[in-house]
Amino acid sequence: MSRQRNIEIARTLLEGIGQGRDPEDIAAPFAKDLVFEVQGDADAMPWIGRRTGRQAMADFLRDLRALTEPLSFDVDDILASDDRAAIVGALRTRIRTTGKVMASQFAIVLTIADGVVTRFQMLEDSFALSRAAR
């Protein structure tokens, strides 16, 4: 896979999220056996932890929209290798249940094989997220 193609896959994901596309449509090009990982306090938000399957991506997007209000989502860079794309940036979001605002830098690492995302890993300040959710 080419680095440029992996950057395009990352951009397509970001566009789908930014345009509010249906979570099932955004998740459709992901692998059926996708490995979905967001490290942190699994009791803080439903998407934190390790899950498998394309549905995990759709559930993440649905839960994210229901439980948070995005205040800012700034992408600083998209980096790529032959089998990965990494989206690096910063975000601010309000947790709807508590009204608290969480700010964090983030990295989303997509592992890609044959044009399909096989692993989605998000790294963020999970401590700040856990505190804002409680």
Image (tube, rainbow, N blue to C red):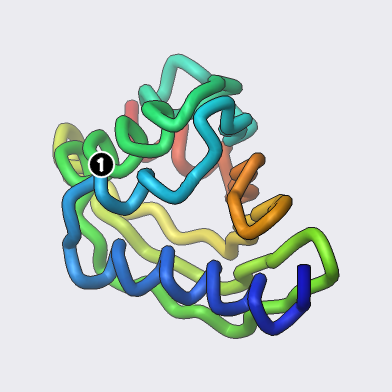
> Residue 127: horizontal and vertical position, in percent?
57, 37
Vertical relation: 25 (above or below) 60: below
Farthest residue, direction right = 82
Residue 41 in view here: no
Does residue 53 appear to the left or right of 67 in the view shown?
right
Q: Amino acid at mark 1?
A: Glu
Residue at 25%, 61% in the rendered image: 70
**Local secondary structure at mark 1:** helix
Task: Residue at 55%, 78% (x, y): give it.
Answer: 8
* Quadrant the C terminus occupies: top left
- Front residue of 57/87: it is 57
Q: Position of residue 31 (x, y in %)?
A: 55, 38
Q: Is residue 48 left or right of residue 134?
A: right
Residue 37 appears at what percent x and percent y?
Answer: 61, 33
Density class for disc 1 (Cα within 10 Å; few <14, some 14-19, many ≥20) is some
Single out the residue that lies furthest toward the top. 43
- Residue 130 pos. (x, y %): 46, 32
* Residue holding disc 1: 24
Quadrant in which the N terminus is drawn? bottom right
At a point 20% along the width and 71% down the height, the residue shown is 19
Tell me if residue 89 can be seen: yes
